[in-house]
Amino acid sequence: MSAAVSTQKAGRIELDDIAIHLPGKVRFEAVRNITTTIAGGEFVSIIGPSGCGKSTLLNAVAGYLQPSNGRLRVDGEAVSGPGPDRGMVFQHHSLLPWRTALDNVAFGLKMSGVGRRERRERAEEFLQLVGLRGFSDRYPAQLSGGMQQRVEIARVLINNPRVVLMDEPFGALDAQTRERMQQLLLGIWGRLRPTVLFVTHDIDEALVLSDRVLVMTHRPGRIREEIVVDLPRPRPEDISVSPEFIALKKRCLALVQDEVRQSLVGGLEVARIELPVEA
Amino acid sequence: MSASALALSPAAASATAPAAPEIPRGGFLAGWWAGLRLDRIALRVLALILCVAFWQAAAVHHLDLGIVTFRFVPAPTEVAAAAWGLFQSPKLFAHVTNSLIRVFAGFGVAALLGIALGLVIGRSRWLEDTLLPPLEVMRPIPGVAWIPLAILMFPSSELSMIFITFMGALFPVLLNTIHGVEAIDRRLIASSRSLGAGRWSVFAEVVLPGALPSVVTGLAIGMGTSWFCLVTAEMIAGQYGIGYYTWESYTLQNYADIVVGMLFIGAFGMASSGLIKLLGRLLMPWYRIQERHA
Ligand SMILES: Nc1ncnc2c1ncn2[C@@H]1O[C@H](COP(=O)(O)OP(=O)(O)O)[C@@H](O)[C@H]1O
Ligand SMILES: [Mg+2]
């Protein structure tokens, strides 16, 4: 574990002219020309109109999808499939309903052959890390949405991943819980320092959390602009009313709205597009 | 570095969760009984008594409703007398054990084969395309129609009978297993692969437990349909079996005995299906919790 923290470089993601095609009635291009490098330990958010390919891009980094063009590497190695070095958190938890919170968190250790006693001890520690001490024996269905996502995060972190991929992880939570989860995530990220690639449709969320925000175009998704969020850390709770924050937010909002407009103008071919909830 | 060294400041870490949902106490049996309140049990018993009373009245008064007549239907009192006769018969034990062996042997093989086939068919499109069509053709064929072939195909009549109870149980188990496997949330498989699960672990940790509720349903239905085929199967029998007893009573025109046989089959079928459901509940405590919170 200490290696991942002390070497700043672990978790570097290189996307080099990535295109991804998805199967449908007709095979179509979901993202195109994605080129960017995410430094090890960096916190990067992706925003863009709904349906622009944010989840698709994340799924490719996770190894669920193969790019149809370009090179995708993590720490110099081509991604060839899913693995515990790249943890994934979805909008709705994907905990095993037949395992308790503790056993869900311990799952990754079980897969890597850690003995029962040790993995239970470490799972307890990680449950504590996400503020769920005392909930070990609950089944996922007995937890609230926010608690389920905490278990999900603990379950990913216990594998000491170089990269954590999050696809609108707090999108289904109420505003208060969401804010608490954001603070929790920032706290954990500050200590463990994995690279985080975070998809959201909430511009405030992206700006509060990230070092950098990638704004994507409408479909096929390309990178419209990279916005560096040079706000100091740790960020105070009232950061979202600071003039710098508001300036950044206006920029992001303008870009996203412009992309939504363009996707509606060219709308007939993307008739299935849904309007982003908060743009 | 250990996670405890990372424990967050109390403020962030103890961001206590919203009011926690209740945990069921006293195990699931307590919960199961708690579901049946006394007044509802009383109502159910009363309904049964009323049915029997109606049957008695209809049989005694030779009720004739035009398309259906109770003139030849034995009354519950006659059936009770016939049942008493069967209970005192030295043959009862042989009837019951023979039938139990046939049903449980056929059901057991159907369970093993149905679950195994269902799991592989549910996981592989190629196997679905090659194995499912012939099975689908056999599915609508009733047990009675299998009798001649069953006699020709198997060396002993005992095996022919087990084959028919087997066919009765196979399809509910098979189809429910396939359905259970195919209904598994793809994200569970995706995220467990991201947590380091290989092919076998995905199968053992995700597919198997994920399909289990559906498998148990299939087993409970299959147990019922296996009993359902018992009379058909035991038409082949020489001398023992509840189904044989029922069929023989018909050929001998002992109407009260027929009803005794029918009730035996009904009771045994219900009890063994109930047993399967009970085992399912024991095996999947999480499932009821999930249902309750859904
Ligand atoms: N399994 C799929 N089959 C076909 N089309 C899909 C599939 N998943 C997503 N799409 C389409 O691909 C595009 C990109 O989807 P996605 O990456 O989920 O967008 P986002 O996460 O940005 O909202 C969308 O237009 C969506 O409708
Ligand atoms: Mg998405």
Image: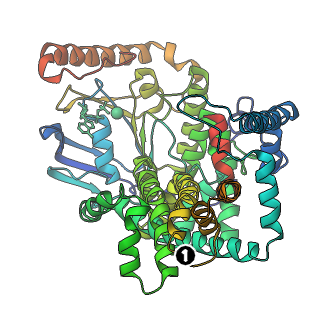
Residue at 27% x, 28% y is A51
Quarter placement of the C terminus of chain A: top left
Residue at 69% x, 35% y is B62
Say if residue B60 shows up in the picture: yes
Q: Is residue B106 above or below residue A225?
A: below
Mark 1 belongs to chain: B
Where is ligand 2, by quadrant?
Answer: top left
Amino acid type, callout 1: Ala
Q: Is residue A34 above or below residue B243?
A: above
Nearest the eye: B286 or B171: B171
Q: Position of residue A14 (x, y in %)?
A: 26, 50
User: In which quarter of the view is residue A173 placed?
Assistant: top right
Mark 1 residue's CB less than 8 Å from ligand 1: no
Residue at 61% x, 60% y is A106
Nearest the eye: A11 or A78: A78
Q: Position of residue B191 (x, y in %)?
A: 44, 52
Q: Can you identify the residue that label 1 sits on?
A: B237
Nearest the eye: A172 or B100: B100
Q: State left or right for residue B246 relative to residue A16.
A: right
Q: Is disc 1 placed on a helix, strand or loop?
A: loop
Nearest the eye: B273 or B20: B273
Query: Outermost residue toward the bottom?
Result: B155
Q: Position of residue B116 (x, y in %)?
A: 44, 69
Q: Position of residue B1 (x, y in %)?
A: 62, 61
How dense is the environment of label 1, judged by Cα within 10 Å: few (below 14), some, or many (20 and up)?
A: some
